[in-house]
Amino acid sequence: MAVVVVTYRSAETIDDCLQRLRAAEGVAAIRVVDNQSDDDTLEIVQRHAMADARVRFIANPDNPGFAVACNQGARDANGDAGWLAFVNPDCLVERDTLSQLRALARDRGDILLGADLIDEQGHRDGAARRRDPDFSAMLAGALGGKPAAKLELPIDDAQALQPVEAISGALMLMPRALFKRIDGFDEGYRLHAEDLDLCRRAREAGAMIAVANHIRVLHVRGVSSRSRPLFVEWHKHRGLWRYFRKFEAPRRSVWVSLGVFAAIWLRFPLAYLRARLRTL
């Protein structure tokens, strides 16, 4: 298994993340792709690379975005393993997390598998189980109708593998063959919604999208994004608009498309204000 980690100002958690990945079962290669961090991230990664030949890093001279960096890491680890795991630097796996995920996925053909993400208080992250965005409901809500349902799906612990429409990009496991077949991440996204896009394309290619409900992973959310709330919120909304244009606009009228565009961007100032207040 090859693990790809994309970093940006990740010094707070990357040391713990890499220690755990190096100790994890079944990991043949670890590729860290850094998007122009200006903190101690690269110094920490270099230390791990010197101590473990499986760890290599790519230091991008700019920040081309999460999707580009994921594809870079996957290409650099080409041939190291038949499975790819994409792990955020703020996800802290246990020794058997990835091997358990791979064991669950191994006999299920094409699959894109996530884990049950929890925060430091043990709360389960709703983003681990999501539906596709409902743009019609979003538009209706913006026009004063019933608000759109959240993307989060209810947890069904009766299922060890719960099928969903989308999982979080914080931790994803998939066969390399599937990743290649759907051409990896769409590099037109800079930050956010690329995971929704990947899940949708994998699903349309016949893959199962699922969450391993009984495998818990600590996710210390927002370590990188806290430092740039305006940048993050801008690209969240830009990513959502790209997703709509790619998957939904071709079957919608021009008036619906204009309405969705307005609904997305009218929401942006309020979303930024909320994010800014959280950083304070």
Image (tube, rainbow, N blue to C red):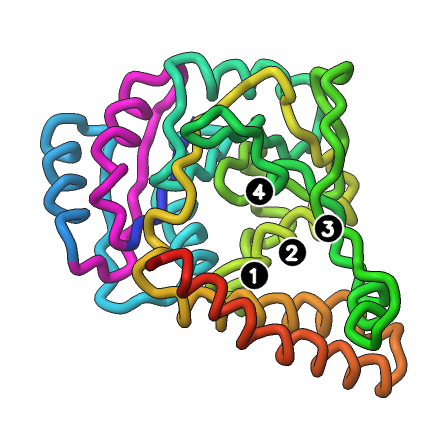
Q: Which disc, if any, is residue 197?
A: 2
- Give the magenta-colored segment's residue range: 9-38
* Nearer to us: label 2 or label 3: 3
Marked residue nearer the N-terminal end (1 or 3):
3
Chain-order first, disc 2 or disc 3: 3
Q: Earlier in the sequence, mark 4 or mark 1?
A: 4
Judged by depth in the image, the label closer to the viewer, 1 or 3, is 3
Q: Tell whether label 1 touches label 2 (CB within 8 Å).
A: yes
Whether residue 238 appears in this view of the structure is no
Q: Which residue is mark 1?
A: 186
The quarter holding residue 276 reads: bottom left
First in sequence: mark 2 vs mark 1:
1
Q: Quadrant of the N terminus?
A: top left
Residue 38 location in percent, x, y? 17, 60
Is 236 placed above or below 53 here?
Answer: below
Residue 240 belongs to magenta span = no
- Above or below, 103 relative to 37: above
Q: Amino acid at mark 1?
A: Asp
Q: CA distance from mark 4 to mark 3?
A: 14 Å
Q: Nearer the viewer, residue 224 or 191?
A: 224
Q: Amino acid at mark 2?
A: Asp
Residue 13 is covered by the magenta coloring: yes
Q: Amino acid at mark 4?
A: Ser
Residue at the disc numbered 4: 168
> Which residue does the image show at 58% across and 44% down from the upper left?
179
Q: Looking at this view, is 220 or 245 the one in front?
A: 220
Image depth: mark 4 or mark 1 in front: 4
Per the image, label 3 sits on a secondary structure element best described as: loop
Q: Residues within 10 Å of mark 1 (few under 14, many from 20)?
A: some
